[in-house]
Amino acid sequence: MTFDATDIARTVQTANWKLRYYEAGAGHPLVLLHGSGPGATGWSNFAGNIEALAARFHVYAVDMPGWGDSDPATVDRLDHVAAAIEFLDAVGIERAAFVGNSMGGQTSLRLATEHPGRISHLVTMGPPVGRTPTLFGPGDGPSEGLKVLVQAYRDPSPANMRRLVEIMVYDKARFATPELCQARSDAALARPEHLRNYVEGLPKGAPLPKWVRTDLLPSIQVPTLLIHGRDDRVVSYETSLYLLANIPDSRLVLLNRCGHWAMIEHADEFNRLVTDFVANN
């Protein structure tokens, strides 16, 4: 990155939230929504994508309520779709392409069903979709990756962050570096209220107290690109096969040697895929 996080960081007050976001580029608005891990932010999820995408689009990578430098949120107030709409209104965007990883993908799916006039394109990477029948995914509750994620919330030590990063990626030697694990631990510990709210909300379904209604998936009319890692141990790629079968104008790119963080492990290809998709659909 030639961009520096502090140079492109912004803060906006919406109707209910003070939100941190990272802004770059010009053109059609492209909103990047991060996943739910401890220490996750718009920057940590998309640092390798913002510059490339900003060459063609006006990019906004948002720290959602309960994460990063945005306001804390207890689970009873946690509605990221409402927060995303507030963000669009606050920065003056009528319609945007939404690109969401994991929790951010679930938010983008819900937004496409509940506010179709505010989204132009939908891109997801490994979104959970709730309790859908599975052939290949585990059937005994949370996946291996989600269990590690919850443990990292309870104890965000560098050791647990290493376990988390290792389960998020295919190439552990390249991505699960001591520096990254320490940085994620430091980021999580810097906002203890986020950790506390997440753990206290677990019995109520944090971070997704409200899921997309699967019966509404066929109503999504915007062009949809589903990107998923073949080796995802957090959310099985079977989820994206389900979405492909239910969203009319959708296509799926399944990446081998790729875990839950497609935008990080395959950043160059991801950037090309998203740029071509949004520009030409």
Image (cartoon, rainbow, N blue to C red):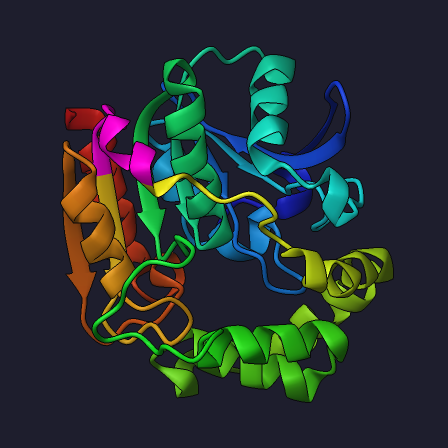
Evaluate whether residue 50 shows in this view: yes
Picture quadrant of residue 253? bottom left
Q: Residue at x 49, y 44 (%)?
A: 211
Q: Nearer the viewer, residue 212 or 266?
A: 212
Q: Nearer the viewer, residue 143 or 229?
A: 143
Instruction: Locate the C terminus and report the quarter of the image it occupies.
Output: top left
Residue 179 on the magenta segment: no
Q: Which residues are magenta?
A: 215-224
Q: Is residue 131 above or below residue 156?
A: above
Q: Is residue 243 above or below residue 13?
A: below
Q: Nearer the viewer, residue 267 or 7?
A: 267
Q: Residue at x 15, y 33 (%)?
A: 248
Residue 1 appears left or right of 119: right
Residue 10 appears left or right of 120: right
Q: Is residue 8 above or below residue 136?
A: above
Q: Residue at x 69, y 83 (%)?
A: 158
